[in-house]
Amino acid sequence: MTERLVVVGGDAAGMSAASQARRLRPELEIVAFERGSHVSYSACGEPYYVGGMVDSIDSLVARTPEEFAARQIDVHVRHEVSAIDLEKRKVQVTSLDGSGSRTVGFDQLIYATGSRPLRPTDITGIDGPGVFGLRTLDDAAVLKEKADQGPGRVVMIGGGYIGIEMAEAMVDRGWQVSMATSGLHILERTLDDRMGELADRAVREYGVELLTDARVTAVLDHGARQVVSGDGFSLVADLVVIGLGAGPEVELAAGAGIPLGVTGAVAVDDRQATGVPGVWSAGDCAEVRHRVSGLPVNMLLGTVANKTGRIAGTNLAGGDARFPGVLGTAITRIGPTEISRTGLKFNDAADAGFAPVSGFARGTVSAGYWPDNAPMGVMVIADRNTGQLLGGQIVGGPGAGKRIDVIATAMWAGMTAAELAWVDLAYAPPFSGVWDLIHIAARRAAEA
């Protein structure tokens, strides 16, 4: 009999694995099940579709089920895998369009269910009819329709990446935007306080009413409008959007007996193997190793999903690929201000056993005399004893954010802060000063 691969979850990780397996094993039968209406799509582009910067939702789809079918990958959308039987090597699949359930056998299985937006149960009314999340293209289509009915007033609950990008989108659509985050600043999990303050200022300058240290306790439905409230504040909204982050979707794995790791995500080795023979996991639902701390982390990034999916696909097809780990490099923006980070925050570095020091430099994206210049702040974190680069963060105008790739590359290569301070970076007045702020921040960290 032909060997069969079943893919549970049809977005970045699952379809990357399926595609790589197909390249290496032309004879392999591949069947993928996705409970949503689309596969292989860019979730990162959803806020920009809602905001009108992307005209068609179809532009966010990398490949359709028909395109996968042409490559002999059998994709079933609107089909949910409700159970996995590891002993009998079968999955239970339910059609969400009402055509019933069936069992499908497998020889190998990719568990790539992704992540699920967090909806804390201690917020009264969080699951009410006027509260929306953003994960799938179906979610984006609903929010786009709501945005088209405005402008009005929208309240964002949470100060993470989705909250920031949706705030930008709704301001661009002419809506009044308020954002309530329980953190002392936005992106509190990924930015140190000094950089978070710069990011907060950018959010407010773009026209967003930002409430920090503001824990939402209730979303009360008042017909056409909602009231978002917490200790000492109350916000009226025509639309409420949840941006509280996400967690790995692992209930199906746990129920089947696929081991979970310390982060709560599926435990895998560097080959994306779960420890259950023939069962692999990749993407938002799986753990990866942090290259700086060496610890397992659950990193919800599209870059990581695509890479780990390719590793899994290579190995299940008989290859021997190893995932080298992550730094958590990420970037976003609010209007003209770009926000990026890589590696560990200062306190996280201390918790991981390092003796962190930081260097901070503030200046401009271009030469100081260049017209239409924009401010920029750069932080570099290093180990006091060895000089090892541990992390970096950047907040600044156009051209600032992608500089984080310089720090990430230096970290990946094992450079010290002192070495980064002398790297031969390009210079011309429209692009930087003679000493880029990365040079200055790295030197200050090396000398701290």
Image (spheres, rainbow, N blue to C red):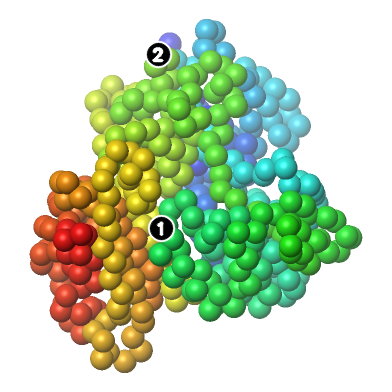
Work out which quarter of the rendered image holds the C terminus and state it: bottom left
Tell me which amino acid carries mark 1.
Answer: Asp
Q: Residue 51: x, y in percent?
A: 59, 69
When asked about the image quadrant of residue 372, the answer is bottom left
The answer to which of 192 and 284 lies nearer the viewer is 192
The crowd level at tag 1 (other Cα within 10 Å; few <14, some 14-19, many 20+) is: many
The relative height of residue 23 versus residue 5 in the rendered view (above or below) is below
- Labels 2, 1: front one: 1
Q: Secondary structure at mark 1?
A: loop
Q: Earlier in the sequence, mark 2 or mark 1?
A: 1
- Using the image, tell me which numbered label, if any, was put on residue 277: 2
Q: Residue at (72%, 40%) from the top-left corner?
A: 121
Is residue 320 at least partly visible in the picture? yes
Q: Count up the numbered dots.
A: 2
The relative height of residue 24 versus residue 397 in the rendered view (above or below) is above
Q: Residue at (72%, 75%) from the top-left corner?
A: 151
Task: Give me the C-alpha separation between circle 2 and circle 1.
Answer: 41 Å
The crowd level at tag 2 (other Cα within 10 Å; few <14, some 14-19, many 20+) is: few
- Using the image, tell me which numbered label, if any, was put on residue 251: none
When asked about the image quadrant of residue 445, the answer is bottom left
Q: Residue 167: x, y in percent?
A: 59, 67
Residue furthest right as drawn: 223
237 horizontally vs 401: left or right? right
The relative height of residue 292 versus residue 143 in the rendered view (above or below) is above
Q: Residue at (44%, 70%) from the top-left corner?
A: 198
Q: Residue 319: x, y in percent?
A: 25, 25
Residue tagged by mark 1?
Answer: 192
Q: Residue at (61%, 55%) from the top-left corner?
A: 182
Is residue 408 at least partly visible in the picture? no
Work out which quarter of the rendered image holds the N terminus and state it: top left
